[in-house]
Image: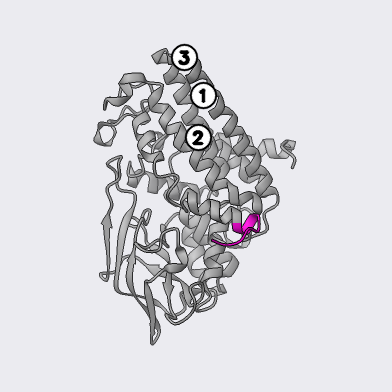
Amino acid sequence: MDLSFSPAEEAFRAEARDFLETSLGGDFAVVRGRGGPGDEDALFEERLAWERHLGASGWNCLAWPEEYGGADADLNRQVIWYEEYARARAPGRLGHIGEGLAGPTIIAFGTDAQKERFLPPIVRGEELWAQGYSEPDAGSDLANVQARAVLDGDAWVISGQKVWTSGAHWADWAFVLCRTDPAAPRHRGISYLLVPMRQDSITIRPIVQLTGTSEFNEVFFDGARTDAANVVGEVDGGWKVAMGTLAFERGASTLGQQLNFANELDAVVDAARQSGRIDDPSVRQRLTAAWAGLRIMRFNTLRMLSGMQGATLSREAMIAKLYWATWHRNLGALAVDVLGPAGQISDEADGMRHDQGAVPTCELGPAQRLFLWTRSDTIYGGTNQIQRNIIGERALGLPRE
């Protein structure tokens, strides 16, 4: 694992930094620093325009092969892009599910016709995607999905419910796990369908979170239809495709996530200085532990990415979610603690305000939003308990429960 960058790669960094600074200093200045945890609903139309600006400028889907509209960027260039994106405090991405999950899955498992239809609009930032995995009785137990899809002539007809569906209220399409053979064993008889979300037979109900925002949704399919050709991989073979999608979720974008974590940690340190609590030895110890933990996270991610093979989840990747979710939850608690008693009051004047001066939803300050949001980190994307099972069974080869 080489942590250095070549002169050509540093030139790429300068190009990326110039693009971001120029764009975010001009027409898109309003979205700078917006759309992060607890702020996902902010400035939707402006951030959608940002997605299209990225596509038109050639900065979207950099890791994709050139034949599909990407730049075929190697790992180092991906790392550089995500680092500079975070350092510039560029907005939270509306298109990340399409770019990071749906697109790579279609590239790896899809047909030529699917690639031709679905990949270009993702690159252009014109179509947004959602992930239809979790259900009321199939969250971390993904193999227990009960949403049904029945082939009716030239279309799949879908009935059932999905929950915790991020961005469903914005999405044009979703990739949805459905049971297509109810008699098959749990991990079989599941198909991976691409479903248009803008149809009357789909009902989307926002779920109000602790932060007062509604990034997540319940989604009800009542006879929703999608073309018979919109199954990725083999019919009844969707489990393999679904696992491939989860592997892509652990890709280079996680380094950008960590740079955003670093921005949050810097804000926590600044707030501790302003409140005077940085002089408390226990607070300094927690800040130091957070700093060290973030670097451990980065080094493990670089090790993980250096050994990734397409849609295969490495042993190193199996510990990543458990580690960063726990770290981030602890940072949320620290963010409120460094404010002292003021952290218990809904007040924007907490030393971590947005540059734009916008009043947050529910009158929460950024530290309070961070605290509330990070309660969910150890639940979504596979709970900490499930992550430990995965590590034990798949990485260490221990007997199943």
| Element type at mark 1 | helix
Q: Are marks 2 and 1 in contact (CB under 8 Å)?
A: no
Magenta segment: 393-401
Circle 3 sits on which residue?
A: 280
Alpha carbon separation for disc pair 3 and 2: 23 Å
Q: Nearer the viewer, residue 139 or 226?
A: 139
Q: Name the side, left or right, on which 325 lies relative to 43.
A: right
Q: Which mark is residue 18?
A: none
Disc number for residue 287: 1
Answer few, some or many: residues within 10 Å of disc 1's Cα (few below 14, many 20 plus, some between 14 and 19). Answer: many
How many numbered marks are there?
3
Q: Residues within 10 Å of mark 3 (few under 14, many from 20)?
A: few
Report the residue at 38% width, 77% height from top. 149
Classify residue 134 by image quadrant: bottom left
User: Which badge, 3 or 2, comes first in the chain's sequence?
Assistant: 2
User: Label 3 amino acid?
Assistant: Asp
Q: Which mark is residue 261?
A: 2
Q: Compute the Cα span from label 1 to label 3.
A: 11 Å
- Closer to the observer: label 1 or label 3? 3
340 relative position to 250: left or right: left
Residue type for callout 1 = Leu
Callout 3 secondary element = loop
In the rendered image of this protein, does residue 53 appear above or below residue 342?
below
Q: What residue do we see at 31% from left, 55% from top?
A: 217
Determine if residue 118 is in view.
yes
- Residue 326 falls within the magenta-colored stretch: no
Q: Position of residue 239 (x, y in %)?
A: 52, 69
Residue at 45% in and 25% down:
267
Q: Residue 390 lies in what quarter of the image?
A: bottom right
